[in-house]
Image (tube, rainbow, N blue to C red):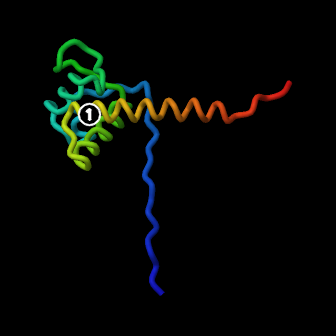
């Protein structure tokens, strides 16, 4: 009898208050700084800091950049396409959250 490996889901808890540098972000997501600068230019992520050399990012940016990279790789999207797709996915998440709240019955007192 052969055993099939079940797919595993990797997850990681991200501290929303922690900041990372541009180099940290690039290393974590295996992307180059120019590509990240393009994401900033298209409004996909927002750095803290005035100059590129001083940019800091929330660790949630790591998640967003990784998702952007998958969209580019898997769907062949360019940066404007990635920005649009992420914006639409954000809107979809918001609508789903509103729908979930509508489904919760009010509590009686």
Please name whichever residue, 39 or 2, is drawn nearer the observer in this view of the structure: 39
Q: Can you give x and y, in whole percent of width and height, for residue 28 in the image?
A: 27, 40
Quadrant where the C terminus is found in the figure: top right
Which residue appears at 45% of the width and 34% of the height? 92
Crowding near the residue tagged with mark 1, few <14, some 14–19, many ≥20 C-alpha atoms within 10 Å: many
Q: How many marks?
A: 1
Which residue appears at 44% of the width and 28% of the height? 16
Residue 106 quadrant: top right
Residue 81 quadrant: top left
Q: Is residue 35 left or right of residue 94?
A: left
Which residue appears at 33% of the width and 30% of the height? 61
Q: Can you give x and y, in whole percent of width and height, for residue 83 in the image?
A: 28, 31
* 66 is higher (above) or lower (below) than 38: below
* 93 is higher (above) or lower (below) than 58: below
Under circle 1, the secondary element is helix
Q: Is residue 9 left or right of residue 87?
A: right
* 41 is higher (above) or lower (below) than 64: above
Disc 1 marks which residue? 25
* 86 is higher (above) or lower (below) than 55: below
Instruction: Kindly give the residue lying farthest to the top in the view shown.
Output: 50
Instruction: Kindly give the residue lying farthest to the left in the view shown.
Output: 34
Q: Can you give x and y, in whole percent of width and height, for residue 78 in the image?
A: 19, 37
Instruction: Kindly give the residue lying farthest to the right in the view shown.
Output: 109
Q: Can you give x and y, in whole percent of width and height, for residue 44 in the image?
A: 29, 27
Which residue appears at 20% of the width and 45% of the height? 76
């Amino acid at each position: 009898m052969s055993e099939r490996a079940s797919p595993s889901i990797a997850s990681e808890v991200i501290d929303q208050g922690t900041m990372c540098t541009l180099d940290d972000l690039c290393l974590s997501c295996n992307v180059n700084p120019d590509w990240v600068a393009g994401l900033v230019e298209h409004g996909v992520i927002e750095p803290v800091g005035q100059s590129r050399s001083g940019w800091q990012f929330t660790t949630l940016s790591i998640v967003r950049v990784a998702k952007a990279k998958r969209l580019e790789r898997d769907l062949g999207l360019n940066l404007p396409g990635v920005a649009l797709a992420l914006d639409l996915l954000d809107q979809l998440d918001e609508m789903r959250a509103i729908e979930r709240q509508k489904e919760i019955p009010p509590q009686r007192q």
